Image (cartoon, rainbow, N blue to C red):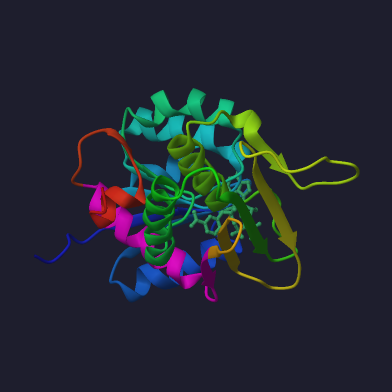
Amino acid sequence: MKPPLLSVLVNGSKGRMGHAVIEAATAAGVTVGAAVDVGDDLRRAMTSCDVIIDFSSHAATRALLETAVALRKPVVIGTTGHSAAAKSELRPLAAQVPCVWAGNFSIGVNLLFALTRRAAAVLDDSYDVEVVEMHHRFKKDAPSGTAARLLEIILAERKLAADALRHGRQGITGERSRSEVGVHALRGGDVVGDHTVLFAALGERLELTHKASDRGIFARGAVRAAQWVVSRPPGVYDMQDVLGLT
Ligand code: NAD
Protein backbone atom coordinates (compact mmCIF):
# COMPACT_ATOMS: atom_id res chain seq x y z
CA MET A 1 0.00 0.00 0.00
CA LYS A 2 1.31 3.46 -0.88
CA PRO A 3 1.97 5.67 2.18
CA PRO A 4 -0.36 8.71 2.39
CA LEU A 5 0.82 12.08 1.09
CA LEU A 6 2.12 14.03 4.04
CA SER A 7 3.21 17.52 4.91
CA VAL A 8 5.98 17.48 7.51
CA LEU A 9 7.35 20.17 9.82
CA VAL A 10 11.11 19.85 10.32
CA ASN A 11 12.23 21.29 13.68
CA GLY A 12 15.95 22.11 13.92
CA SER A 13 15.88 22.61 10.16
CA LYS A 14 19.17 24.52 9.96
CA GLY A 15 21.18 21.79 11.68
CA ARG A 16 23.05 18.81 10.22
CA MET A 17 20.12 16.45 10.75
CA GLY A 18 17.55 19.07 9.74
CA HIS A 19 19.22 19.34 6.33
CA ALA A 20 19.38 15.56 5.99
CA VAL A 21 15.68 15.19 6.90
CA ILE A 22 14.61 17.80 4.33
CA GLU A 23 16.62 15.90 1.70
CA ALA A 24 15.21 12.50 2.74
CA ALA A 25 11.62 13.77 2.88
CA THR A 26 11.89 15.30 -0.56
CA ALA A 27 13.36 12.06 -1.95
CA ALA A 28 10.48 10.06 -0.38
CA GLY A 29 7.83 12.33 -1.90
CA VAL A 30 6.93 13.86 1.47
CA THR A 31 6.23 17.61 1.41
CA VAL A 32 8.30 19.76 3.74
CA GLY A 33 5.49 22.12 4.75
CA ALA A 34 7.54 24.04 7.28
CA ALA A 35 11.20 24.29 8.27
CA VAL A 36 11.61 25.71 11.78
CA ASP A 37 14.70 26.67 13.74
CA VAL A 38 15.59 28.92 16.72
CA GLY A 39 13.41 32.04 16.84
CA ASP A 40 10.73 30.83 14.40
CA ASP A 41 7.04 30.62 15.35
CA LEU A 42 6.64 26.89 15.97
CA ARG A 43 2.92 26.96 16.79
CA ARG A 44 1.98 28.86 13.67
CA ALA A 45 4.11 26.58 11.47
CA MET A 46 2.63 23.48 13.08
CA THR A 47 -1.02 24.29 12.32
CA SER A 48 -0.70 23.50 8.62
CA CYS A 49 1.44 20.30 8.93
CA ASP A 50 0.43 16.65 9.43
CA VAL A 51 3.46 15.52 11.44
CA ILE A 52 6.59 16.95 13.08
CA ILE A 53 10.13 15.60 12.81
CA ASP A 54 12.40 17.03 15.50
CA PHE A 55 16.19 16.99 15.54
CA SER A 56 16.96 20.13 17.56
CA SER A 57 17.93 20.44 21.21
CA HIS A 58 16.81 18.52 24.31
CA ALA A 59 15.95 21.91 25.83
CA ALA A 60 13.29 22.36 23.13
CA THR A 61 11.40 19.07 23.66
CA ARG A 62 8.91 20.18 26.33
CA ALA A 63 7.67 23.20 24.36
CA LEU A 64 7.54 21.12 21.19
CA LEU A 65 5.43 18.41 22.85
CA GLU A 66 3.12 20.91 24.57
CA THR A 67 2.39 22.56 21.22
CA ALA A 68 1.93 19.21 19.46
CA VAL A 69 -0.49 18.03 22.18
CA ALA A 70 -2.47 21.29 21.99
CA LEU A 71 -2.76 20.94 18.18
CA ARG A 72 -3.08 17.10 18.26
CA LYS A 73 -0.16 16.52 15.89
CA PRO A 74 1.89 13.30 15.68
CA VAL A 75 5.59 13.76 16.47
CA VAL A 76 8.87 12.03 15.66
CA ILE A 77 11.58 12.93 18.17
CA GLY A 78 15.18 12.23 17.22
CA THR A 79 16.76 14.76 19.56
CA THR A 80 18.97 13.19 22.24
CA GLY A 81 20.65 14.42 25.41
CA HIS A 82 17.68 14.20 27.82
CA SER A 83 18.51 13.02 31.33
CA ALA A 84 16.67 9.89 32.49
CA ALA A 85 14.61 12.10 34.81
CA ALA A 86 13.68 14.52 32.01
CA LYS A 87 12.72 11.62 29.75
CA SER A 88 10.39 10.03 32.27
CA GLU A 89 8.86 13.43 33.04
CA LEU A 90 8.21 14.12 29.33
CA ARG A 91 6.90 10.66 28.44
CA PRO A 92 3.32 11.14 29.73
CA LEU A 93 3.12 14.33 27.67
CA ALA A 94 4.44 12.56 24.56
CA ALA A 95 1.93 9.72 25.11
CA GLN A 96 -0.97 12.12 24.50
CA VAL A 97 -0.19 12.14 20.76
CA PRO A 98 1.15 9.44 18.42
CA CYS A 99 4.91 9.80 19.03
CA VAL A 100 7.95 7.88 17.81
CA TRP A 101 10.83 8.70 20.15
CA ALA A 102 14.09 6.98 19.22
CA GLY A 103 17.73 7.59 20.04
CA ASN A 104 18.64 6.13 16.67
CA PHE A 105 16.60 5.73 13.48
CA SER A 106 18.94 3.46 11.53
CA ILE A 107 17.86 -0.06 10.67
CA GLY A 108 21.35 -1.45 11.38
CA VAL A 109 21.44 0.10 14.85
CA ASN A 110 18.00 -1.23 15.66
CA LEU A 111 19.25 -4.68 14.76
CA LEU A 112 22.29 -4.00 16.98
CA PHE A 113 19.84 -3.36 19.86
CA ALA A 114 18.20 -6.74 19.25
CA LEU A 115 21.57 -8.55 18.94
CA THR A 116 22.86 -6.89 22.12
CA ARG A 117 19.78 -8.03 24.03
CA ARG A 118 20.32 -11.58 22.80
CA ALA A 119 24.06 -11.61 23.57
CA ALA A 120 23.52 -10.15 27.07
CA ALA A 121 20.94 -12.87 27.74
CA VAL A 122 23.13 -15.75 26.47
CA LEU A 123 26.47 -14.61 27.95
CA ASP A 124 26.56 -14.66 31.76
CA ASP A 125 28.44 -12.22 33.98
CA SER A 126 31.76 -13.98 33.36
CA TYR A 127 31.61 -11.85 30.18
CA ASP A 128 32.47 -8.22 31.02
CA VAL A 129 30.40 -5.73 29.04
CA GLU A 130 31.72 -2.37 27.83
CA VAL A 131 30.13 0.11 25.42
CA VAL A 132 32.30 2.37 23.27
CA GLU A 133 30.93 5.12 21.04
CA MET A 134 32.60 7.70 18.79
CA HIS A 135 31.06 10.82 17.23
CA HIS A 136 32.14 14.01 15.46
CA ARG A 137 33.73 16.84 17.41
CA PHE A 138 30.55 18.99 17.27
CA LYS A 139 28.35 16.60 19.24
CA LYS A 140 27.04 18.24 22.41
CA ASP A 141 25.95 15.30 24.58
CA ALA A 142 27.65 12.16 25.89
CA PRO A 143 27.23 9.27 25.92
CA SER A 144 25.15 9.26 22.74
CA GLY A 145 21.43 8.47 22.81
CA THR A 146 22.25 5.19 21.04
CA ALA A 147 24.83 4.24 23.67
CA ALA A 148 22.30 5.14 26.37
CA ARG A 149 19.75 2.77 24.78
CA LEU A 150 22.35 -0.02 24.50
CA LEU A 151 23.15 0.48 28.19
CA GLU A 152 19.46 0.33 29.14
CA ILE A 153 19.19 -3.00 27.31
CA ILE A 154 22.31 -4.42 28.98
CA LEU A 155 21.29 -3.25 32.47
CA ALA A 156 17.82 -4.76 32.03
CA GLU A 157 19.17 -8.14 30.82
CA ARG A 158 21.79 -8.26 33.60
CA LYS A 159 19.29 -7.02 36.22
CA LEU A 160 21.62 -4.17 37.19
CA ALA A 161 20.78 -0.61 38.32
CA ALA A 162 22.15 2.56 36.75
CA ASP A 163 24.86 2.82 39.42
CA ALA A 164 26.57 -0.15 37.70
CA LEU A 165 27.70 2.21 34.92
CA ARG A 166 31.33 3.38 34.89
CA HIS A 167 31.77 6.42 32.67
CA GLY A 168 35.44 6.21 31.70
CA ARG A 169 38.06 5.14 34.21
CA GLN A 170 40.93 7.03 35.74
CA GLY A 171 43.39 6.55 38.56
CA ILE A 172 43.56 3.59 40.93
CA THR A 173 40.24 2.03 40.00
CA GLY A 174 40.92 -1.42 41.44
CA GLU A 175 40.12 -4.60 39.55
CA ARG A 176 37.02 -4.62 37.39
CA SER A 177 33.98 -6.05 39.18
CA ARG A 178 31.59 -8.41 37.41
CA SER A 179 28.66 -6.12 38.01
CA GLU A 180 30.03 -3.00 36.35
CA VAL A 181 29.36 -1.84 32.78
CA GLY A 182 31.94 0.51 31.26
CA VAL A 183 30.94 3.41 28.99
CA HIS A 184 33.40 5.33 26.84
CA ALA A 185 32.64 8.33 24.61
CA LEU A 186 35.26 9.26 21.99
CA ARG A 187 34.93 12.58 20.14
CA GLY A 188 36.72 13.77 17.02
CA GLY A 189 36.66 14.78 13.39
CA ASP A 190 33.56 14.12 11.33
CA VAL A 191 32.59 10.65 12.58
CA VAL A 192 28.84 10.26 12.02
CA GLY A 193 28.42 7.57 14.70
CA ASP A 194 30.22 4.36 15.72
CA HIS A 195 28.98 2.03 18.47
CA THR A 196 30.60 -1.14 19.79
CA VAL A 197 29.36 -3.46 22.51
CA LEU A 198 32.11 -5.73 23.85
CA PHE A 199 31.56 -8.95 25.77
CA ALA A 200 34.99 -10.00 27.10
CA ALA A 201 35.62 -13.23 29.03
CA LEU A 202 38.82 -15.10 29.89
CA GLY A 203 39.72 -16.70 26.56
CA GLU A 204 37.36 -14.98 24.14
CA ARG A 205 35.77 -11.68 23.20
CA LEU A 206 32.67 -10.88 21.19
CA GLU A 207 32.37 -7.41 19.63
CA LEU A 208 29.18 -6.12 18.02
CA THR A 209 29.91 -2.99 16.00
CA HIS A 210 27.82 -0.61 13.92
CA LYS A 211 29.36 2.25 11.95
CA ALA A 212 27.28 4.99 10.37
CA SER A 213 28.99 6.83 7.53
CA ASP A 214 26.07 8.96 6.30
CA ARG A 215 23.47 10.70 8.49
CA GLY A 216 20.99 10.05 5.67
CA ILE A 217 20.28 6.68 7.34
CA PHE A 218 18.81 8.46 10.40
CA ALA A 219 16.93 10.94 8.24
CA ARG A 220 15.37 8.22 6.05
CA GLY A 221 14.40 6.27 9.17
CA ALA A 222 12.79 9.38 10.70
CA VAL A 223 10.77 10.01 7.52
CA ARG A 224 9.68 6.36 7.54
CA ALA A 225 8.67 6.78 11.21
CA ALA A 226 6.66 9.90 10.31
CA GLN A 227 4.80 7.99 7.58
CA TRP A 228 4.10 5.17 10.05
CA VAL A 229 3.06 7.23 13.09
CA VAL A 230 0.36 9.33 11.42
CA SER A 231 -2.03 6.38 11.39
CA ARG A 232 -1.28 5.17 14.94
CA PRO A 233 -3.26 5.85 18.13
CA PRO A 234 -1.66 8.15 20.75
CA GLY A 235 1.25 6.55 22.60
CA VAL A 236 5.04 6.49 22.68
CA TYR A 237 6.63 4.16 20.14
CA ASP A 238 10.23 3.49 19.17
CA MET A 239 11.95 2.47 15.96
CA GLN A 240 11.65 -1.21 16.87
CA ASP A 241 7.86 -0.74 16.59
CA VAL A 242 8.17 1.06 13.24
CA LEU A 243 10.38 -1.72 11.84
CA GLY A 244 8.29 -4.53 13.33
CA LEU A 245 11.24 -5.81 15.40
CA THR A 246 9.22 -6.04 18.65
P1 NAD B 1 22.97 20.58 15.04
O1 NAD B 1 23.57 21.35 16.19
O2 NAD B 1 23.67 20.54 13.72
O3 NAD B 1 21.48 21.13 14.74
C1 NAD B 1 20.54 21.41 15.73
C2 NAD B 1 19.62 22.52 15.17
O4 NAD B 1 18.54 22.71 16.08
C3 NAD B 1 20.33 23.87 15.02
O5 NAD B 1 20.04 24.45 13.74
C4 NAD B 1 19.74 24.70 16.15
O6 NAD B 1 19.68 26.11 15.85
C5 NAD B 1 18.34 24.09 16.24
N1 NAD B 1 17.68 24.35 17.52
C6 NAD B 1 18.20 24.42 18.76
N2 NAD B 1 17.25 24.74 19.65
C7 NAD B 1 16.10 24.87 18.94
C8 NAD B 1 14.77 25.20 19.31
N3 NAD B 1 14.43 25.49 20.56
N4 NAD B 1 13.83 25.24 18.33
C9 NAD B 1 14.13 24.98 17.03
N5 NAD B 1 15.40 24.67 16.62
C10 NAD B 1 16.36 24.62 17.58
O7 NAD B 1 22.74 19.12 15.62
P2 NAD B 1 22.47 17.78 14.78
O8 NAD B 1 23.76 17.06 14.55
O9 NAD B 1 21.56 18.07 13.64
O10 NAD B 1 21.68 16.92 15.89
C11 NAD B 1 20.45 17.38 16.43
C12 NAD B 1 19.99 16.38 17.50
O11 NAD B 1 19.68 15.13 16.87
C13 NAD B 1 21.02 16.08 18.57
O12 NAD B 1 20.37 15.91 19.82
C14 NAD B 1 21.64 14.76 18.10
O13 NAD B 1 22.23 14.01 19.12
C15 NAD B 1 20.40 14.09 17.55
N6 NAD B 1 20.62 12.98 16.58
C16 NAD B 1 19.79 11.93 16.69
C17 NAD B 1 19.88 10.89 15.77
C18 NAD B 1 18.89 9.76 15.87
O14 NAD B 1 18.93 8.82 15.03
N7 NAD B 1 17.97 9.79 16.83
C19 NAD B 1 20.85 10.92 14.77
C20 NAD B 1 21.69 12.02 14.68
C21 NAD B 1 21.56 13.06 15.61
Identify the residue at horizontal 56%, vertical 48% (top origin). 145
Badge count: 0
Identify the residue at horizontal 50%, vertical 45% (top origin). 149
Q: Position of residue 117 (x, y in %)?
A: 40, 49
State left or right for residue 124 relative to residue 135: left
Quadrant (top left, top right, bottom left, bottom right) of the N terminus: bottom left
Q: Which image quarter: residue 71?
A: top left
Tell me: residue 167, above or below residue 164.
below
Most foreground residue, 235 or 51? 235
Residue 211 appears in the rendering? yes
Q: Position of residue 155 (x, y in %)?
A: 51, 37
- Please say whether residue 109 is one of the residues in the magenta stretch: no
Q: Position of residue 84 (x, y in %)?
A: 57, 31
State left or right for residue 35 relative to residue 76: right
Tell me: residue 103, above or below residue 198.
above
State left or right for residue 140 relative to residue 61: right
Most foreground residue, 161 or 144? 161
Residue 49 appears in the rendering? no
Magenta residues span 207-230
Q: Position of residue 217 (x, y in %)?
A: 44, 69
Residue at the front extreme of this rendering: 203
Tell me: residue 174, above or below residue 218.
above
Q: Which image quarter: residue 161?
A: top right
